[in-house]
Amino acid sequence: MLVDELSASLGERTALINQLRAILLERGFVAPQGKRKLEGFLALLMDEQGGAGLTPRIILLVADARKQWAELDRRIAAFDAEFVRWVKENDEARRLTTIPGIGAIVASALVAAVGRAESFDRGRDLAAWLGLVPRQFTTGGRPKLLGISKRGNKYLRKQLIHGARAALPYVAERDTPLGRWAKGLMSRAHRNVAIVAFANKLARIAWAVLRRHERFAAIRTPVAA
């Protein structure tokens, strides 16, 4: 499946970047955090300084890793373009992209995984299937909420959390029911907790969009946590 191929390529690129960092660190070069900053650091070190301070063998190793990185970037960009084309042709996926924080990749992965969400009676069921609801532990008759279950589709859960992280500040600035809910959430919860709670909300909204065959703007968004 295209989503699995993209996920594999992303994982391969991450592993390659981590390997590059380790190689440089072992030789006294502390690379900056962030993929693009690392690219700039390598360009300066290898292209402008000619690998000064590195042995010929390590220079060849780093050069080969950079070529692999460029090829993975090309492959991932091709996957992204394919997702965008597919979403334009699929009604369900196109409606999902009207939800803040859900782009072409997440929309296509959701449709591929759950179709029109007919297997889920409620939005909470979809969120639970994705592992985005808190686990509960009862002691002395009182339930205690723990971390999210992390069961279900790991890739989709991760992508929804990434989307929630990017969209939450923007949504919280909007004077809408969802925006006011998000703003209140950010004021009372730790940032990471708020992001996961918002990802849970996105999953529930996605369920409503899929089941009702409507765009996000037409959905009466529930604001309860």
Image: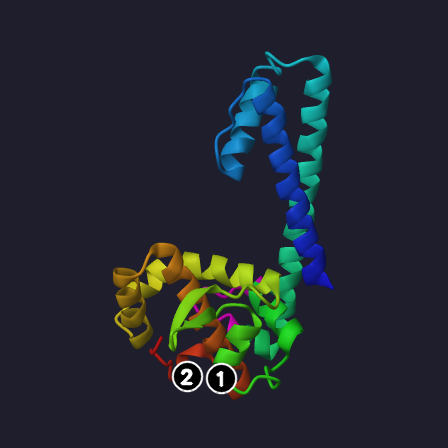
Q: Residue at x 54, y 87 (%)?
A: 121
Pick the front one: 29 or 102: 29
Q: Name the residue under label 1.
A: 214
Q: Crowding at label 1, few (<14), some or many (≥20) Cα neighbours within 10 Å? A: some
Name the dominant secondary structure of the magenta segment: loop
> How far is mark 1 from mark 2, CA to CA?
6 Å
Q: What stretch is highlighted in magenta?
A: 96-105
Q: In which quarter of the image is the C terminus?
A: bottom left
Q: Do the residues labelled 1 and 2 touch (CB within 8 Å)?
A: yes
The image shows residue 43, relative to residue 220, as above or below, that is above
User: Could you say whether the residue bearing mark 1 is in a helix, strand or loop?
Assistant: loop
Q: Quadrant of residue 66?
A: top right
* Residue in the picture at 57% in, 84% down: 120
Figure quadrant of the N terminus: bottom right
Q: Is residue 103 magenta?
A: yes
Residue at 41% x, 68% y: name it.
Answer: 145
**Could you say which is closer to the camera, residue 37 or residue 144?**
144
Report whether residue 103 is seen.
Answer: yes
Image spot of residue 65 (x, y percent): 69, 31
Q: What element carries label 2?
A: helix
Can residue 122 be found in the magenta stretch? no
Q: Position of residue 129 (x, y in %)?
A: 57, 73
Residue 17 location, x and y as percent? 61, 36
Residue 164, labelled with which disc? Answer: none
* Quadrant assignment, res 174: bottom left
Tell me: residue 117, above or below residue 56: below
Q: Nearer the viewer, residue 39 or 126?
A: 126
Amino acid carrying label 2: it is: Ala
Q: Which residue is label 2 attached to?
A: 218
**Type of amino acid at the residue the image marks with label 1:** Glu
Left or right? Give the position of 156 relative to 2. Answer: left
Q: Residues within 10 Å of mark 2 (few under 14, many from 20)?
A: few
